[in-house]
Amino acid sequence: MYLALKEIRHEKLRYGLIISMVALIAYLIFILTSLAFGLAGENTQAINSWDAKSIVLNKDSNISLTQSLITKDQAKDAKLSSKEAVIGSTLVVAKHKGKEKISASFIGARKSQFIIKDLKLTSGHKARTNHQIVVDEKFKTDGYKLGDKVTLNSFKDKYEIVGFTKNAKLNVAPVAYGTMTTWKYLRGMPNAPVSGSAIVSKNAKYNAHSSHLKTYSMNKFISKLPGYSAENTTFGFMIGFLMIISLVLIAVFLYILTMQALPTYAVLRAQGIPARALVSTITNQSLILMASGVIIGGALAAMTGWLLPVGVPMAFNIPVLLWISLGLMIMGVIGAAIPAQKIATVDPVSVIGG
Amino acid sequence: MSVIELKNINKYFGTGISRVHVLQDINFAADRGQLILVVGPSGSGKSTFLTIAGGLQTPTSGSVEVEGKPVEKLSKAQRDKLRLNQVGFVLQSYNLVPYLKVREQFEFVDKIKKQGTLNKPELADLLKQLGISELVDKFPGELSGGQTQRVAIARALYANPDIVLADEPTAALDSEKVMEVGKLFKELAETRNKAVVVVTHDTRLLEYADKVYEIMDGKMKSATKPA
């Protein structure tokens, strides 16, 4: 550690530059990871708040909530317990004079079932009539308030916002919770023998007892949300490549420095300094560089999170970011392996000339 | 008993028709308190002799003994230890770690060798003897050639070795400095009771030597005492 610290202190500019590069890479990784988590969260917030383990959809719906319909007979055969709830889902555009239109996901549910029973409000009350809705706080951010009467899609009926709820987004759109009757009306089939779009259950192995319905795990359902997997895979690739870039960067940098300092290492070996001590110098240097870069990158990411507007979907998942930091440190150690091998095998005879 | 003794050393490099007999039946001995020169032209085998004497290479045949113990029987780690504790190297260039101040060069030795180095008053005395007491807060890059060489000598002696092996220590110095270094090595050998072995082609150092070995085409002539 002694030599590692002394060299870094002596070569401030050189090491400052590499720390800056590591910091920028770490910053980018932290921001991308937080964005990935933020966006993933906006896809699944509402689902997560239900705390359901499985979902039953029409087997021909292509695992799409909005494409699925469950008939009254099927719902009757499904033998619902307190762990199951029927939901109806449709996409709507909420409008209010003088305010921005909001694309939302309307979820119709029964008051007696856990979706509505467990719904936590930040203000107001739950929907008591077919013309009342509870909406995600995104509406509040966009200027909507309790008592506002909005129209949904092209229907003339007005729906009063009677409550706000937090973290209720589905597929990035804010959710508007209302009654099942309203959902049927919005789907244009008020009198059809339809029960809902899906049955969600807290039981992972729930069986709906119908050949037309199929039970999916919530994870499977989430992975099939439009764009969800593609988005996560893209972020995963970007983060993975940045990790590899950090590995290559540290390896190349330390390799060049080591090659330049090889005669000095050879002298030290000639003087009887054990190879182990010199190898630990390069490994420690790498760890110091990575740790400094990660700390600076983390601080920059935190500052960015603080400065960004509320609407930017960033979620700082501290345990995940700590694991990523550890990953970067490991990359640093791997990156130091090649120069360390050069040092370990340096021939002290090479500095005895003439 | 000599501090270091080389007996019938032979060293070959290469194989087949490119095999070269670099050192041929070398016999050498150095005692404490003596400055011994090994002189010879470039390519004569001086450096190979030095690396074998310092335990950096093993001879093809023959034996190297330090304080009566055969070096070739030591493991790599044991030879590292031997060089750290009993052999001090003063090399032509790159003697010092460029990013360590003079005093840190000694601190670094302390980090590796936990005991047996000079204590503070002894170091102060050595630096005074070498005339470099004022340079302790300077980096090697801030020193002149002569000062760098003196610091390198101090660094080699700080670990308190029995033997100091110097490789062309006057290569980059002018005549005046060569005389200074010669005088200094002689003084260090006598006052500190070390065996100082200097490998050189610089004949200006001859007048300070207690013994001179001449090496030519891998063959060493018996020791002579300069007139």
Image (cartoon, coloured by chain):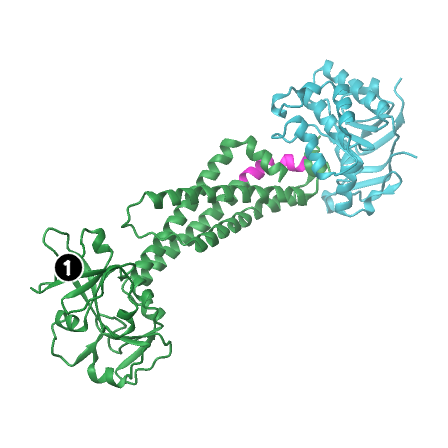
- Dot 1 amino acid type: Ala
* Left or right placement of residue A10 versus residue A80 in this view: right
Whether A152 is drawn above or below A249: the answer is below
Name the quarter where the C terminus of chain A is drawn. Answer: top right
Query: Nearest the camera: A350 or A49?
Result: A49
Q: Which residue is mark 1?
A: A94
The image position of residue A297, as x and y in percent, is 43, 43
What residue is drawn where x is 82% and y is 40%? B10
Chain of the residue under the numbered disc 1 shown in the image: A
Question: What stretch of residues is rendered in magenta?
Answer: A256-267
The picture quadrant where one finds residue B165 is top right
Q: Chain B drawn in what color?
A: cyan
Q: Does residue A163 show up magenta in the picture?
A: no
The picture quadrant where one finds residue B82 is top right
Whether A178 is drawn above or below B174: the answer is below
The image position of residue A30, as x and y in percent, is 40, 49
* Left or right placement of residue A104 versus residue B212 in this view: left
